[in-house]
Image (spheres, rainbow, N blue to C red):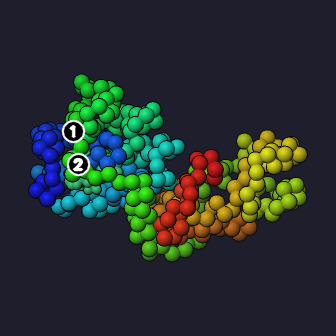
């Protein structure tokens, strides 16, 4: 593998150092975009596997995913020779619902820790965690620091050019709980433009959803999650009628929660208009979800143990009949306990339509 891959001497030494450790290891790779994190993880996984360790990988990069579908954190065991991380068979996933960790840090942290724990419970002795390139600035630092706190790695491999990420290096040096291994980027590392990254994601989404077919979920049984629609109680038909008159628009759904009302309408309504309507009705606030915004939302389908069984694309919600139509490749409707809404909208061919803010749905 090292012949095929142009592995620098320093990367080789880092792998040897990790291999010498006979405790169960947790190695977290951190670095700027295109530093070679994923390549290093694949190289290390293969070295450990060849040394007969039980190896597992957590792919905590929701944008440039290698194992699973983008928008999820995924994990799998390395039992066969690999040349690249995408050859590690997908075994388990955790739904984040967006293609960037921004705005979803809790989900990213929870998922990485949960999947690492599940690998460990399967007897995996060497866990390798590949992370996203969000590392710069206050939010990047915050994410990577918390991840290190929560995952309790035995080794952090920080791949960086000189002068880059000095503050993280300084923070992580001389620690008793883990060894910091600082490596230069591979000279073979290539950069990818934002367009290339997006195209790569679209291709992964496309191949994942190729076999998808529409399934109907009965919302009197299946619970919604990560949306205001899961909160509060529906308003009666009279109130909805009054609302429709004031808004001069059909109201497909209306409900009351602690923050005010949430409504679904066919078209978009401006904030000042909604504020005025709220004033007239004596309501704290009205939040409107235009129904077209629900079409194409990436969603996670969970079973009754809370495990991700499939990823789908929400097509529509029929509020009158309490049904959601979802394009999904694997799930049987009877297995689905919870439907979690993400914050990116996709066409069935994997093209990203838009990204929603965390509070939008
Ligand atoms: N040692 C290497 N030998 C050959 N190609 C490499 C090597 N290291 C990196 N590359 C190439 O450089 C590119 C970036 O590497 P890689 O995907 O590993 O970086 P990354 O840090 O994981 O990036 P991202 O932040 O997008 O996740 C890839 O196309 C990869 O194939
Ligand atoms: Mg990567």
Residue 288: x and y in percent read 73, 53
- Is residue 103 or residue 262 the one in the foreground? 103
Neighbour tally class for label 1: few under 14, some 14-19, many 20 plus, Cα within 10 Å: some
Which residue is at 15% across, 50% downward? 7
Q: Secondary structure at mark 1?
A: strand
Residue 330: x and y in percent read 45, 70
Q: Secondary structure at mark 2?
A: helix
Q: 297 left or right of 146?
A: right
Q: 32 left or right of 188?
A: right
Disc 1 to disc 2, C-alpha distance: 10 Å
Neighbour tally class for label 2: few under 14, some 14-19, many 20 plus, Cα within 10 Å: many
Which residue is at 88% across, 58% downward? 245
Q: Is residue 281 above or below residue 138?
A: below
Question: Does the CB distance between marks 1 and 2 fall below 8 Å?
Answer: yes
Q: Quadrant of the N terminus?
A: bottom left
- Is residue 188 or residue 46 the one in the foreground? 188
**Can residue 122 be seen in this snapshot?**
no
Which residue is at 49% across, 53% downward? 98
Does the beta carbon of the residue at mark 1 sit less than 8 Å from ligand 1?
A: no
Residue 27: x and y in percent read 25, 42
Q: Count all numbered tags in the image, as a single digit.
A: 2
> Residue at label 2?
40
Which residue is at 38% across, 39% downward? 135
Q: Which mark is residue 106?
A: none
Does the beta carbon of the residue at mark 2 sit less than 8 Å from ligand 1?
A: yes
**Can residue 207 be seen in this snapshot?**
yes
Q: Is residue 332 above or below residue 264?
A: below
Q: Earlier in the sequence, mark 1 or mark 2?
A: 2
> Residue at label 1?
183
């Amino acid at each position: 593998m090292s012949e095929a891959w142009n592995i620098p001497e320093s990367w080789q030494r880092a792998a040897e150092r990790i291999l010498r450790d006979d405790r169960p290891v947790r190695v977290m790779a951190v670095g700027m975009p295109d530093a070679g994190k994923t390549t290093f993880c694949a190289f290390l996984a293969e070295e450990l596997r060849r040394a007969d360790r039980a190896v597992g990988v957590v792919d905590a990069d929701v944008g440039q995913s290698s194992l699973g579908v983008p928008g999820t954190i995924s994990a799998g065991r390395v039992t066969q020779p690999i040349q690249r991380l995408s050859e590690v068979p997908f075994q388990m996933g955790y739904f984040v619902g967006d293609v960037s960790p921004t705005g979803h840090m809790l989900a990213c942290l929870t998922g990485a820790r949960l999947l690492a724990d599940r690998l460990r419970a399967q007897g995996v002795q060497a866990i390798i965690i590949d992370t996203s390139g969000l590392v710069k600035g206050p939010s990047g630092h915050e994410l990577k620091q918390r991840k290190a706190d929560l995952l309790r790695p035995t080794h952090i491999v920080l791949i960086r050019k000189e002068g880059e990420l000095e503050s993280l290096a300084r923070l992580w040096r001389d620690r008793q709980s883990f060894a910091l291994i600082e490596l230069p980027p591979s000279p073979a590392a290539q950069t990818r433009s934002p367009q290339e990254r997006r195209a790569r994601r679209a291709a992964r989404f496309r191949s994942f959803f190729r076999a998808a077919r529409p399934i109907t979920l009965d919302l009197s049984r299946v619970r919604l999650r990560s949306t205001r629609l899961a909160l509060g109680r529906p308003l009666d038909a009279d109130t909805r009628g009054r609302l429709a008159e004031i808004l001069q628009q059909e109201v497909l759904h209306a409900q009351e929660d602690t923050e005010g009302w949430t409504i679904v309408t066919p078209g978009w309504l401006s904030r000042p208009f909604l504020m005025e309507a709220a004033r007239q009705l004596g309501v704290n606030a009205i939040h409107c979800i235009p129904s077209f915004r629900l079409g194409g939302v990436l969603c996670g389908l969970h079973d009754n143990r809370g495990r991700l069984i499939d990823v789908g694309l929400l097509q529509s919600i029929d509020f009158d009949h309490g049904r959601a139509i979802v394009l999904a490749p694997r799930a049987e409707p009877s297995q689905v306990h919870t439907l979690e809404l993400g914050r990116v909208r996709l066409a069935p061919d994997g093209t990203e339509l838009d990204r929603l803010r965390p509070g939008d749905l």
